[in-house]
Amino acid sequence: MPTRRKNQVAAANIVRSAGWLFGALIFACSPLPAEEVPVTTLAHGCIACHGADATPRGGEIPPLAGRDAEVLLDLLQAYRSDGAAESTSMHRLTGGYSDDELAALAQYFSEQAQ
Ligand code: HEC
C-alpha cells in the first residue's frame, strides 16, 4: 500500500476512534434518570443541614425525622413554587427535584425515628 494511502487509512481510523470515544464520554456523563436515584441518596443532601434524626440543629433548620409526610410534602412544594413560602435556602434547593422525588423524600423522612 502506498504511504499516502496508509496515511489516509490511519487518519480515518483516528477520526472513527475519536467518534467512539466522544460517544462513550457523552454516555458516561449523562445523568441517571430521576427514578433511578434511590431516595436514600437524595436524602443525603438534606441530612447535611437537617440531620438524620429529630434532634433540632439549632437556629433556623428544623428537624424532619418522624414528621407527617403530607405536611413535609406541602412545605416542600410551597418552597418550590416561587414565593409561596418564606425561605433562605429551601426555595433554591427544591427546584432541583421532581414531584415524585419530593414525595419520596417526604415519605422517607416521615419514616425516620423521632
Ligand atoms: C443548606 C442547608 C439545607 C439543605 C441542604 C436542606 N435544607 Fe431544608 N431547610 C433549610 C433551612 C434553613 C430551612 C428553613 C427555611 C429556609 O430558610 O429555607 C429548611 C426548611 C425545610 C423544611 C420545612 C420544615 C418546617 O418545619 O418548616 C423542609 C420540609 C425541608 N427543609 C426539607 C428538606 C429536604 C427534603 C432537603 C433535601 C432535599 C433539604 N431540606 C435540604 C436548610 C436546608
Image (cartoon, helix red, strand yellow):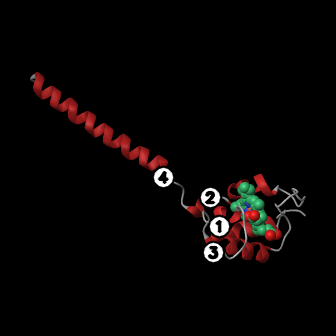
Q: Which of marks 4 and 2 is nearer the N terminus?
A: 4
Residue shown at the point (59%, 64%) measured from the top left: 35
Real-space CA distance between mark 4 and mark 2, rounded to the nearest whole angstrom: 13 Å
Real-space CA distance between mark 3 and mark 1, rounded to the nearest whole angstrom: 15 Å
Q: Residue furthest top?
A: 3
Please state the horizontal and vertical placement of residue 24, each as a whole percent of the image. Answer: 41, 44
Please state the horizontal and vertical placement of residue 96, each as a whole percent of the image. Answer: 60, 62
On screen, residue 38 above or below 73? above
Disc 1 within 8 angstroms of ligand 1 (CB): no
Badge nearest the viewer, 2 or 3: 3
In the image, what residue type sits under mark 1?
Glu
Real-space CA distance between mark 4 and mark 3, rounded to the nearest whole angstrom: 27 Å
In-image side of 13 versus 104 (left or right): left
- Tell me the residue that label 1 is attached to: 101
Residue shown at the point (88%, 61%) measured from the top left: 54
Q: Which secondary structure, mark 4?
A: loop
Badge nearest the viewer, 4 or 3: 3
Residue shown at the point (31%, 37%) measured from the top left: 17
Residue shown at the point (66%, 61%) measured from the top left: 93
- Tell me the residue that label 2 is attached to: 37
Real-space CA distance between mark 4 and mark 1, rounded to the nearest whole angstrom: 19 Å
The answer to whether the residue labelled 2 contacts the one labelled 1, judged by CB atoms less than 8 Å apart, is: yes
On screen, residue 24 above or below 36? above
* Image quadrant assignment for residue 108: bottom right
Q: Earlier in the sequence, mark 3 or mark 1?
A: 3
- Tell me the residue that label 3 is attached to: 81
Please state the horizontal and vertical placement of residue 83, each as a whole percent of the image. Answer: 66, 74
Real-space CA distance between mark 2 and mark 3, rounded to the nearest whole angstrom: 23 Å
